[in-house]
Image (cartoon, helix red, strand yellow):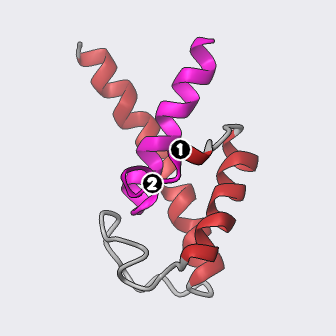
């Protein structure tokens, strides 16, 4: 059980900074204002609904996942933390297949 927790933490540690860097570079013009990874990207105005499509394209290309229409919900894409968790779940499903 500890191994699974360690593995999940390791995955988050590698995926999350990359997702955050993409958002900072593409939506904040490289100015990391120190927003919290759990903060809603839509509510804070960092990303708009069109920006979400840009994020989805990045996730699919960079992490080799397919973001299904039914996956495009706040639970998966609202914050950097939620995006990272979603990517990890999708990668785990892909790798298990």
Q: Which mark is residue 70?
A: 1
Q: Is residue 29 left or right of residue 70?
A: right
Q: How many marks?
A: 2
91 in magenta = yes
Q: Is residue 7 above or below residue 31?
A: above
Q: Secondary structure at mark 1?
A: helix
Q: Nearer the viewer, residue 7 or 93?
A: 93
State the quadrant of the C terminus. top right
Q: Where is mark 2, residue-wise?
A: 73
Q: Is residue 40 left or right of residue 23?
A: left
Using the rendered view, name the quadrant where residue 81 is placed: bottom left
Using the rendered view, name the quadrant where residue 67 is placed: top right
Extreme-right residue of the structure? 61
Using the rendered view, name the quadrant where residue 3 is placed: top left
Residue 62 on image: x %, y %: 71, 48
Categorize mark 1 by other alpha carbons within 10 Å: few (<14), some (14-19), many (20+): few
Categorize mark 2 by other alpha carbons within 10 Å: few (<14), some (14-19), many (20+): few
Q: Nearer the viewer, residue 62 or 14?
A: 62
Q: Which mark is residue 31?
A: none
Q: Is residue 88 above or below residue 73?
A: above
Q: Tell whether label 1 touches label 2 (CB within 8 Å).
A: yes
Residue 84 on image: x %, y %: 46, 48
Q: Residue at x 39, y 63 (%)?
A: 79
Q: Is residue 9 left or right of residue 24?
A: left
Bounds of the magenta segment: 71-97
Extreme-left residue of the structure? 2
State the quadrant of the N terminus. top left
């Amino acid at each position: 059980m500890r191994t699974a927790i360690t593995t999940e933490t390791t995955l988050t540690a590698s995926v999350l900074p990359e997702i955050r860097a993409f958002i900072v570079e593409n939506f904040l013009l490289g100015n990391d204002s120190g927003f919290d990874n759990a903060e809603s990207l839509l509510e804070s105005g960092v990303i708009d609904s069109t920006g979400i499509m840009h994020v989805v394209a990045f996730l699919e290309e960079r992490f080799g996942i397919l973001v299904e229409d039914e996956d495009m919900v706040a639970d998966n894409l609202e914050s950097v933390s939620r995006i990272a968790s979603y990517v990890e779940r999708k990668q785990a499903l892909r790798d298990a297949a």
